[in-house]
Image (cartoon, rainbow, N blue to C red):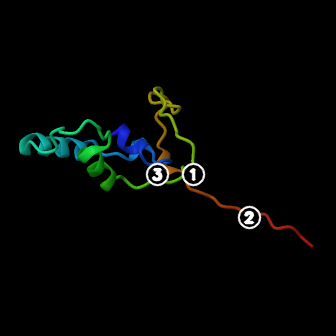
């Protein structure tokens, strides 16, 4: 898979699909096709061509940093028994006078 993605400059190796390579390799074994008869060995080969034909789409740009989940919650789980649903929300808007 790496040889196949390296054959095209700028291709991210993470785009290669393992299951595509596995099924292509299985088909090569079952059919006994692609037996090496020449002295020159093509590193991409049939499996590599299948991998290149079925690449994953490029990753989109990450807009936010990854957030690591905390092992300990920042909210007190055993704290005072406060019914948080009983509080009324108040919204106030400040206006400036001209």
In the rendered structure, find residue 59 and report the number of the disc placed on it: 3
Tell me residue 1's x, y (percent): 33, 40
- The residue under the point 22% across, 39% down is 38
Q: Residue furthest front?
A: 39
Q: Horizontally, is 6 left or right of 21 in the view?
A: right
From the viewer's perspective, is residue 39 above or below residue 96?
above
- Quadrant of image for the C terminus: bottom right
Specify which label sits upstream in the sequence, 1 or 2: 1
Tell me residue 53's x, y (percent): 31, 55
> Closest to the observer: 88 or 23?
23
Tell me residue 24's x, y (percent): 19, 46
- The residue under the point 57% across, 51% down is 63
> Closest to the observer: 41 or 98?
41
Q: Horizontally, is 37 left or right of 12 in the view?
A: left
Residue that badge 1 annotates: 63
In the rendered structure, find residue 93 and report the number of the disc placed on it: 2
Q: Locate residue 43: give its quadrant.
A: top left
Q: Horizontally, is 45 left or right of 12 in the view?
A: left
Tags 1 and 2 touching, CB below 8 Å: no
CA gap, disc 3 and disc 1: 12 Å
Mark 3 is surrounded, within 10 Å at the Cα level, by few (under 14), some (14 to 19) or many (20 or more) other residues, namely few
Mark 1 is surrounded, within 10 Å at the Cα level, by few (under 14), some (14 to 19) or many (20 or more) other residues, namely few
- The residue under the point 33% across, 51% down is 52
């Amino acid at each position: 898979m790496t040889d196949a993605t390296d054959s095209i400059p700028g291709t991210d190796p993470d785009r290669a699909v393992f299951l595509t390579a596995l099924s292509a390799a299985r088909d090569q074994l079952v059919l006994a096709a692609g037996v090496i008869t020449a002295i020159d060995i093509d590193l991409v080969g049939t499996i590599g061509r299948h991998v290149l034909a079925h690449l994953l789409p490029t990753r989109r740009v990450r807009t936010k940093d990854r957030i690591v989940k905390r092992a300990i919650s920042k909210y007190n789980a055993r704290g005072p028994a406060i019914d948080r649903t009983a509080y009324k929300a108040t919204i106030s808007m400040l206006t400036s006078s001209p």
